[in-house]
């Protein structure tokens, strides 16, 4: 417990039992008057990037004091399972599905070498878990994007011939066309529910060159086949999608692995675009590296919006820190993100 009605950004954050909060690359589910924070449980050292336990969850009524719910999606000891101990489980996000009453978790499911680029899926009857793993696969196999042409993929090299960071080679090919057969790569990911209750999955795809937004079925357990490409070859990761006053926004990072880079912002009046990029929304000292952090999610409390960012520590992943920043909206179609020493819901506490 803290006696300060806020959290000092980048300090060690403790739960109500004074244990270090371990929920990285996470997101917040607001449900039934409370908040659930799901994230990657990291362990010591460089090895700590791998999943040795699973997805960790916490519960709070004020977003400041957190009760530990434990590991709500556990790795298995079955080496054939996509969630076996030592795999990678990244950027878990959870929605409540009104049509089924279930809690649905999406995450980046991959191997230790980070090659699989699949969406892991798990469900629970309660936001406290336990979540049951339903499988991992790539998105929308057999479906063409709504906003890009059907084209011949026969001359596109196989994926092993590409790297996943920014490069010119990837830019020369319509990678999505190659991946229609086996499904689209899903790496950094997030979930979003529009005002009409329709849910969408957003993920870095095409070797991280291009974001995809894919609509989900009413039970939130699958894609429904309608998907589109967003900001092709702009190399965005850490995408968080949110909506305010009729405008859709994206907060994203560049594509430099664990190293921080300048954040990116984009706005659109339609989810399917056009999307307008407006550069780095970070403001103030350290803005050029997003204050040493990478975006993970945006959540809202009433009219206020907060970005969750991770300060990754690749030398000791368990010591990665959190940076939660309130977003400012200088106009309806822009947001800014100022470096502030505290996360607090009380405006006067933000200096
Ligand atoms: C980051 C990504 C992380 C993790 C890492 C691996 O860019 O946002 O979630 O996948 O790369 O290098």
Image (cartoon, rainbow, N blue to C red):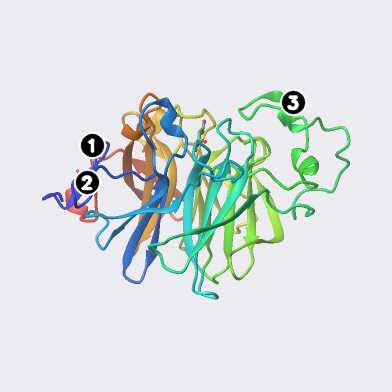
Q: Secondary structure at mark 2?
A: strand
Which class describes the residues within 10 Å of circle 3: few (<14), some (14-19), or many (20+)? few
- Location of residue 182 with respect to 255 vertically, above or below: below
- Residue contact at pointers 3 and 1, CB within 8 angstroms: no
Q: Secondary structure at mark 1?
A: loop
Which residue is located at x 80 percent, y 40 percent?
178
- Residue contact at pointers 1 and 2, CB within 8 angstroms: yes
Q: Which residue is mark 3?
A: 161
Q: Which mark is residue 236?
A: none
Nearest the viewer among 346 and 122 is: 122
- Where residue 181 sits: x, y (%)? 80, 47
Which residue is located at x 40 percent, y 52 percent?
38
Which class describes the residues within 10 Å of circle 2: few (<14), some (14-19), or many (20+)? many
Determine the CA span between mark 3 and mark 2.
45 Å
- Which quadrant, please, contains the C terminus? top left
Q: Of the residues under marks 3 and 1, which one precedes in the sequence?
A: 1
Q: Relative to residue 252, is residue 166 drawn left or right?
A: right
Q: Is residue 335 visible?
A: no
- Location of residue 157 with respect to 198 vertically, above or below: above
Q: Quadrant of residue 296?
A: top left
Q: Secondary structure at mark 3?
A: helix
Q: Which residue is mark 1?
A: 11
- Where residue 153 sits: x, y (%)? 85, 39
Determine the CA span between mark 1 and mark 2.
8 Å
Q: Which mark is residue 7?
A: 2
């Amino acid at each position: 417990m803290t006696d300060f009605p806020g959290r000092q950004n980048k300090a060690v954050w403790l739960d109500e039992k004074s244990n270090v909060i371990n929920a990285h690359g996470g997101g917040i589910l607001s449900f039934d008057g409370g908040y659930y924070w799901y994230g990657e449980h990291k362990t010591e050292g460089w090895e700590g990037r791998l999943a040795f336990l699973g997805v960790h969850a916490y519960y709070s009524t004020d977003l400041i004091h957190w009760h530990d719910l434990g590991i709500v999606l556990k790795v298995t000891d079955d080496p054939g399972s996509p969630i076996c101990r030592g795999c990678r489980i990244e950027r878990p996000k959870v929605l409540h599905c009104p049509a089924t009453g279930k809690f649905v978790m999406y995450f980046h499911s991959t191997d230790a070498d980070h090659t699989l680029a699949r969406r892991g899926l798990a469900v629970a009857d309660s936001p406290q878990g336990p979540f049951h793993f339903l499988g991992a696969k790539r998105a929308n196999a057999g479906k063409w994007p709504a906003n890009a042409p059907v084209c011949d993929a026969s001359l596109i090299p196989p994926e092993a011939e590409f790297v996943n960071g920014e490069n010119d080679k990837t830019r020369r090919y319509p990678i999505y066309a190659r991946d229609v057969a086996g499904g689209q790569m899903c790496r950094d990911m997030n979930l979003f529910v529009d005002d009409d209750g329709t849910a969408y999955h957003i993920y870095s795809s095409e070797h991280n060159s291009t974001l995809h937004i894919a609509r989900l079925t009413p039970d939130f357990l699958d894609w429904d086949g309608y998907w589109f490409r967003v900001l092709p070859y702009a190399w965005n990761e850490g995408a968080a999608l949110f909506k305010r006053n009729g405008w859709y926004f994206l907060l994203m990072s560049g594509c430099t692995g664990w190293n921080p880079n300048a954040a990116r912002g984009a706005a659109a009046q339609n989810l399917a675009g056009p999307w307008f990029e407006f550069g780095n929304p970070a403001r103030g000292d350290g803005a050029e590296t997003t204050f040493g952090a990478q975006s993970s999610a945006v959540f809202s409390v009433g009219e206020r919006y907060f970005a969750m960012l991770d300060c990754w520590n690749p030398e000791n992943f368990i010591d990665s820190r959190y940076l939660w920043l309130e977003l400012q909206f200088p106009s309806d179609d822009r947001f800014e993100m100022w470096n502030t020493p505290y996360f607090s819901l009380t405006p006067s506490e933000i200096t």
